[in-house]
Image (cartoon, rainbow, N blue to C red):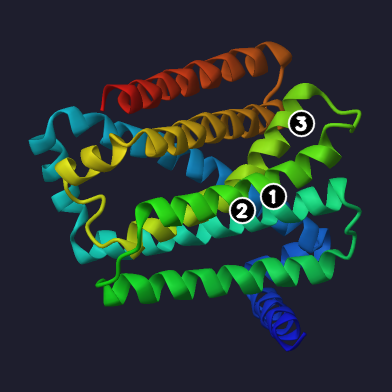
């Protein structure tokens, strides 16, 4: 109970501090926090979709280990380390806020002020823990144990969400988007955490290829690729549909976005089966 109160207190303090920022305070007065949170969710989703494409592009050079190692060596500079840590901010916010939306839409959890406080408080905790792991940089964890535990947790969350979402009157595409979101709520923050619980696991082509050669890891990676690409594509097309007109331009932009996502999905799946 004390931990719950602390997380809510931290989240409320973050909201108060953000409300003092001059530009944000004007929008908060005129539109409210829901407007700010909604835009942050969409912008973080678009940013993470772009990063996903860049990540797949980087991994596609694994078939040429020297090139991959050269790319990763550049990312080893401290400035890239700081950027990698900063990436945790949109990752954990988008994941937890997506979980809040699922709780709101499908589970009747309508106390938004409490849930937003939890999202911000847990996001801050995750960012601090990840930063600590990146600084000490000498830890390791069993790959099999970590991903078995994570997959079990992800499947439990996904099943709970699926039971509520599947009976809703919304379209099949909407349902799959929310279900993949429930799965990724656990898997994506865990993936980022795993990268820093095993120092150097992504910094050498041979180590990455050895890890990806495991049938179990192939299943994990395949599920991540398919879920992330679908979830990202649906999110991008939704944003395009809301903000681009006339309809013909929306159709063209949506078609191009789907083609790009399918290309990178094919690239990622091909990489998984070729390693």
Measure the C-alpha gap from mark 1 to mark 3.
Answer: 15 Å
12 or 160, which lies in front? 160
Q: In the image, residue 257 lies at what x, y percent?
A: 53, 22
For the N terminus, give its image quadrant.
bottom right
Image position of 133 (left or right of 109): left
Secondary structure beneath label 1:
helix
User: Looking at the figure, which quarter contains the C terminus?
Assistant: top left
Q: Is residue 175 above or below residue 118?
A: above
Looking at the image, is mark 2 or mark 3 nearer the viewer?
Answer: 2
Marks 2 and 1 close (CB-CB < 8 Å) = yes
Task: Provide the residue designation for mark 3.
Answer: 175
Residue shown at 46% from the left, 38% from the top: 220
Q: Quadrant of residue 255?
A: top right
Q: Residue furthest bottom?
A: 2
In the displayed structure image, the side of residue 273 where residue 5 appears, left or right:
right
The Cα–Cα distance between marks 2 and 1, rounded to whole angstroms, is 6 Å
Q: Are marks 2 and 3 in contact (CB under 8 Å)?
A: no
| Residue 219 appears left or right of 137 | right
In primary-sequence order, the first of circles 1 and 3 is: 1
């Amino acid at each position: 109970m004390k931990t719950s109160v602390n997380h809510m207190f931290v989240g409320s303090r973050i909201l108060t501090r953000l409300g003092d920022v001059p530009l944000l305070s004007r929008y908060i007065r005129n539109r409210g926090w829901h407007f700010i949170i909604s835009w942050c969710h969409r912008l973080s989703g678009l940013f993470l979709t772009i990063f996903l494409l860049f990540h797949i592009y980087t991994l596609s050079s694994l078939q040429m280990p020297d090139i991959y190692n050269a790319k990763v060596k550049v990312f080893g500079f401290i400035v890239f380390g700081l950027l990698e840590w900063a990436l945790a901010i949109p990752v954990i916010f988008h994941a937890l806020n997506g979980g809040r939306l699922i709780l709101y839409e499908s589970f009747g959890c309508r106390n938004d002020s409490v849930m937003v406080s939890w999202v911000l408080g847990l996001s801050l905790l995750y960012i601090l823990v990840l930063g600590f792991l990146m600084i000490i940089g000498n830890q390791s964890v069993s790959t099999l144990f970590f991903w078995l535990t994570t997959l079990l947790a992800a499947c439990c969350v996904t099943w709970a969400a699926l039971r509520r979402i599947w009976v809703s009157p919304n379209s099949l595409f909407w349902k799959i988007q929310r279900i993949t979101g429930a799965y990724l709520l656990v898997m994506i923050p865990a993936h980022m955490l795993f990268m820093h619980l095993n120092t150097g696991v992504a910094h050498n082509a041979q180590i990455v290829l050895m890890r990806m050669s495991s049938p179990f890891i192939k299943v994990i990676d395949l599920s991540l690729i398919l879920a992330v690409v679908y979830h990202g594509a649906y999110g991008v097309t939704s944003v395009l549909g809301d903000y681009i007109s006339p309809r013909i331009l929306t159709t063209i932009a949506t078609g191009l976005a789907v083609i790009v996502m399918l290309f990178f999905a094919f690239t990622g799946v091909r990489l998984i089966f070729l390693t």
